[in-house]
Amino acid sequence: MILASYQALWKRIMHRKRARFVCRCPNVVGSPRTAQELLVKGRGRIWLGRNVVFGCADSPEFLSTYGYVEARYDESSVSIGDDCVFNNGVSIISAGTDSACSGITIGSRCLFGTRVQIMDSDFHGLRVNERTLLSAVRCRPVLVGNDCWIGSSAILLKGVVLGDGCVVGAGSVVTGEFPAGSLIAGNPARLVRIIQ
């Protein structure tokens, strides 16, 4: 009986056309295709290109996570180019309080593995007396070029710049700038080689 119930649930999940797209952000342009639940929120601006996909039913983390995109403050922004595919459990958070030094921009035709995290801020100051002060938040923009492939569980921190066609290895923690065609991996991520 339990197996039959599980099989019925799985059949229903696999045949649905779209998962829920919960939008709690007044400034969203575009509508993604969603195979997994997706929460979009914040007071900032979010642009979603054509044919952006969140979630994959035939991949890990499908039933246990959801996609999350947030432009937390009025000056925060997230921009995603056309034809990007985000696997399950992706988290993209722009929490910068100054539009000149924050924002997350992702080019077109990029691929993202499960549980990738992208953020343009540390979210709080480092000193004990600054941890609750919004003015102590340090931010820098994140830029991911066109045709990049970001492996599962990779983390892109504030100030990351990836040129077109970069590949980031699974589990990497990326903190710097890398030219087009870079293969990078590790914690902290380092250039392995240039892809020809």
Image: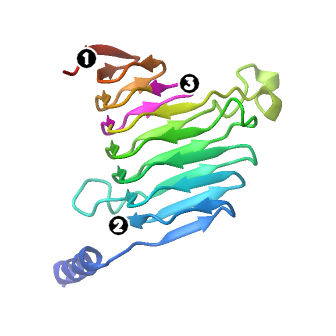
- Please say if 179 is above or below 101: above
Q: How far from the left and from the top, in percent, is residue 41? A: 63, 58
Residue 133 visible in the shown view: no
Of the numbered discs 2 and 3, the one sitting upstream in the chain is 2
| Bounds of the magenta segment | 148-161
**Residue 27: percent from the left, percent from the top?**
67, 60
The reply to whether the C-beta atoms of the residues labelled 1 and 2 are less than 8 Å apart is: no
User: Would you name the residue on which mark 3 appears?
Assistant: 159
State how far apart marks 1 and 2 are (Cα): 34 Å
Q: What label does residue 35 carry, if any?
A: 2
Secondary structure beneath dot 2 equals loop
Q: Amino acid at mark 2?
A: Ala
Q: Which residue is mark 1?
A: 194
Q: Can you see residue 127?
A: yes
From the viewer's perspective, tell me whether residue 123 is left or right of residue 91.
right
Res 110 label: none
Residue appearing at x 75%, y 34% in the figure? 98
Q: Quadrant of residue 149?
A: top left
Sequence-wise, the earlier of marks 1 and 2 is 2
Q: CA distance from mark 1 to mark 3?
A: 21 Å
Left or right of residue 139: residue 67:
left
Q: Residue at x 67, y 40 (%)?
A: 95
* Residue under the image location 32 percent in, 28 percent down: 166
